[in-house]
Amino acid sequence: MALLKTIFEFRGSFGGCYFKHDGYGQHLQAKPRYISKTFRSDMPIRILAFTAVFTNWKQILMFAIPLYWINFAQQYLYRNKRGETYRLTNLQWFYHFNVNREVNGLPIYTYPPHGPYDLPDFTSRGKIFTITTNKPIPMSMLYTGNWYENGYYGFQKVYSCEQIKLHVWYDPVVEKWIISYLPGNKDPNQFWTRFGDGIEGRYIPDNPNEGDITMYL
């Protein structure tokens, strides 16, 4: 004598395949695995990048800049490759945006961008000197900023940096790109000039004591 059983449904998973049953019947679904590959040869570079980014984080803790990242973390959720969303901390967002920029030799985002997918048109890195305990200390982070398109001056676009209240614009009279506190206005000792083609590159100050600013895509 034999015992026969009829299988009406499968549930569970096996080998990446998921067995489901609902009102429409039995379903078999295969879910791909998302794998982010990091080559062994790249690991030392990324470790150095993580270290450099964390060093920058410790530097900006001296200012109120982390408050911007806290607000950013409270406002936005991170979406991964599978479309899943979850909340990152302010430091995790800082790493998310800046590690790859450090690997590629680009200035980091000292301040958060407008949104996870609304990145700046340009970034800048500058050098100025500030007085601390009666000694000149180079504080390049003070002139690290995000630049966004902000209208036109003449027939060229103007880009503005919200953090340091500067604008980069094209002066048709001297045929140069200018950074100043107001488009079209070159107050003495308060503007920088780009001696070269294009908006990217080094800007030389009218007053050498103010330091240089370099624009990047």
Image: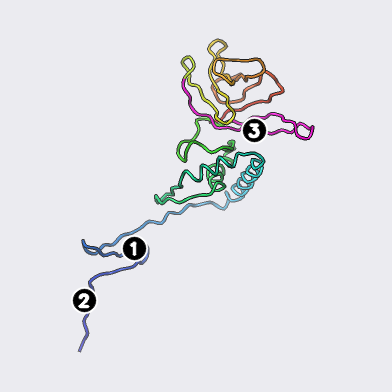
**32 on left or right of 90:** left
**Amino acid tagged 3:** Leu
Q: Label 1's element?
A: strand
- Where residue 166 sits: x, y (%)? 58, 24
Name which of mark 2 and mark 1 comes first in the sequence.
Answer: 2
**83 on left or right of 128:** left
**204 on left or right of 199:** right
Which residue lies at the image location 52% right of the left edge and 51% below the top edge? 38
Label ID, residue 6: 2
Q: Is residue 71 above or below residue 211?
A: below
As drawn, the residue found furthest toward the top would be: 173
- Compute the Cα span from label 3 to label 2: 73 Å
The residue pinned by badge 3 equals 142
The residue pinned by badge 1 equals 17
Q: Label 3's element?
A: helix
User: Quick one: label 3, few (<14), some, or many (20+) residues within 10 Å?
Assistant: some
Name which of mark 3 and mark 2 comes first in the sequence.
Answer: 2
Residue 197's quadrant in the figure? top right
User: Quick one: label 2, few (<14), some, or many (20+) residues within 10 Å?
Assistant: few
- Where residue 113 sits: x, y (%)? 51, 37
Figure coloring? rainbow
- Where residue 157 sits: x, y (%)? 48, 21
- Compute the Cα span from label 1 to label 3: 53 Å
**How many numbered marks does the figure carry?**
3
Q: Please report the bounds of the magenta region as a residue range.
A: 124-151
Q: Is residue 27 above or below residue 56?
A: below
**154 on left or right of 47:** left
Which residue lies at the image location 46% right of the left edge and 15% below the top edge? 155
Evaluate if marks 3 and 2 touch, with contact meaning CB atoms under 8 Å apart.
Answer: no
- Predominant SS of the magenta segment: strand
Q: Nearer the viewer, residue 152 or 172?
A: 152
